[in-house]
Image (spheres, rainbow, N blue to C red):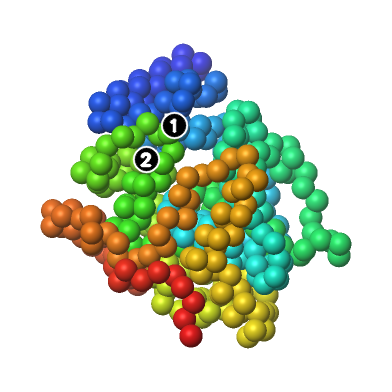
Amino acid sequence: GREEERHERDEKHGAVDELCQTLSSQKYCLTDERGDRPRDGPPFWLPTSRGGRHWAHPAFRLRPSISAALRKRFELNPCDIVIATYPKCGTTWMQQIVLLLIHGPDAKVNPMRDAPWLEMSCSSAANGCQSSSPPISVDELCSYALPSTERPSQRCWKTHAPAHATPWRGGGAAAAAASGARIIVVFRNSKDTAVSMLHHTRNIPPFGFTGGWEEFSMLFREGRVESNSYWDWYEGWWRAAQEHSEAVLWVVFEDMLADLPREVKRIAHHIGTEPSAAQVAAISARCTFSSMRAESADRDKTAKFVKKDHLRVGQAGGWRKVFSSEDCAAFDEKNAQLLRACEGLRMEQGSNKLFEARS
């Protein structure tokens, strides 16, 4: 009854409070800039997929109630394309590619505005907080008009949610496949992801992280960072991609570095667009690191919210400048476990190559 529910809730709150104290002692603060917590739940509390354990989601105040509302009310349609990524794994890059495939290589696009982060946009609207994604209430999202002859035929969204907690009705890749929607997962090697996540965490003040790589490396390996465990996150989505390959396209970050036009054509085929060779070349040119950074700088001149160094270096293999031999061994062990769990998965280590256009 209610007493059991209250007892369970108190236990969960206590576990999260204990976690917050532990992380705070390691220079990793889980309160926002005002030191408060969402009104309808413990601070930044999101479930993991294993054993009922939970880790806190810092800083951004993603509301559990909002995610629950999306899973109950927001329905995907055949016109929907969802980009699913672990943070710092090529999200903005993929948003730019998909938006240009939808709107044309000459279109003026803003990846964060035009491909909203579902769970963040709705949480921001509920909290009244500013973020990199435009605020959209759940009511507004669910009442969006579907495409018509006057509007583009496809809509693009992004999510950082794990495969078992996706923010749409029915949940997961199975619901997307049933609806006719398309999902694109971008996979990046764990070592570059961790280094990029370090800079991302330090550049966003509400995270409260002031430590260096040595402290952050441990947090990342233990899944005590934004979006929890990298390895659990990708294991879940890999299984979803294998079970629903018609709906989920698996794209490797390092493959995009190696041959961007080839990957643009794969993505176009998956979402049902048919760009010409000239259009593929034009889209690829606008999706190089230098082009995207220049466009971002132009947008930032008039933006109300600017995310510092969002497009930082755009390379693979940069981890070699940061990792110790002990770091390599620890990450290699975690990577090996993931590869054993996900038959057919490969992980490229990168070669310090920028994502510039190839002739």
Corner quadrant of residue 341 = bottom left
Q: Which residue is mark 2?
A: 202
The residue type indicated by label 1 comes to Pro
Q: Which residue is mark 1?
A: 206
Position of residue 332 in the picture relative to residue 186 (left or right): left
Secondary structure of residue under mark 1: helix
Residue 64 visible here: no
| Residue farthest toward the left in the current orientation of the protein | 325
Q: Residue at x 40, y 46 (%)?
A: 200
Image marks 1 and 2: residues in contact by CB distance under 8 Å: no
Residue 19 position within the rendered picture, expressed as x and y whole percent measured from the top left: 31, 28
Q: Residue at x 48, y 51 (%)?
A: 310
| Residue farthest toward the right in the current orientation of the protein | 150
Residue 267 position within the rendered picture, expressed as x and y whole percent measured from the top left: 57, 72
Residue 248 position within the rendered picture, expressed as x and y whole percent measured from the top left: 53, 65
Q: Residue at x 31, y 52 (%)?
A: 195
Residue 40 position within the rendered picture, expressed as x and y whole percent measured from the top left: 55, 23
